[in-house]
Amino acid sequence: TDHASGHWLAVRKFMEFAGQDCPDTYKELDEATRILRARLMLEETVEKIRKGLGIAVELQHNVLTAGSVEDAKFYIVGPFDPVETIDGCMDCNVISAGTMIAMGLPDLPFQQEVDDSNLRKFGPGGRRREDGKWLKPPNWTPPNIPETLRQFGG
């Protein structure tokens, strides 16, 4: 736990109180846990989008995939609610930390890898797309999650 944030430690305590598995070393998630984590992530994300941001999302496919999000249509259907948005963002953080805990992994080394990789997107050739998303440059390198995972037995 010396590689874990205070947030991670609080979520672990919550999970222990709830009787959820909190291994001390890396382990792959079983099917039931994978489905639970996916359901929690999607539920909170959809709630944040709808109640907080006031957005409805229409998917063009029956199965949600990474590519299907690019084909999705977004509609303003309600007001922006900062309280619901903040609550949803924080709940998503809790679920993300809980997923790491369920795998027996701390959060800080992985977060550092992702943060460093995101900042590398501002190298030569990076640019802003019309909708505001920043696009990575041609020489960008992704976070080295496999190496970090190996450090923790994965």
Image (cartoon, rainbow, N blue to C red):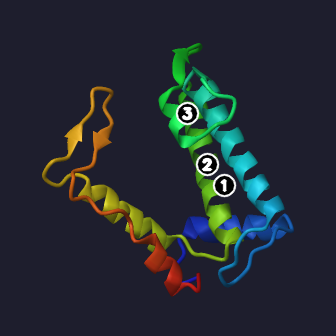
Measured Cα–Cα span from mark 1 to mark 3: 23 Å
User: Residue 87 occupies which quadrant of the picture?
Assistant: top right
Residue at label 1?
A: 95
Residue at label 3?
A: 68
Secondary element at image label 2: helix
> Residue 84: horizontal and vertical position, in percent?
61, 32
**Which circle's residue, 1 or 3, is located before the other in the chain?**
3
Q: Residue 69 carries which label?
A: none
> Residue 143: horizontal and vertical position, in percent?
38, 66
Measured Cα–Cα span from mark 2 to mark 1: 5 Å
Residue at label 2?
A: 92
Secondary element at image label 1: helix
Mark nearest the camera among 2 and 3 is 3
Q: Which amino acid type corresponds to the residue marked 2 in the rendered image?
A: Cys
Which quarter of the figure is the N terminus placed in? bottom right
Q: Is residue 132 left or right of residue 91?
A: left
> Residue 41: horizontal and vertical position, in percent?
67, 47
Q: Which amino acid type corresponds to the residue marked 1 in the rendered image?
A: Ile
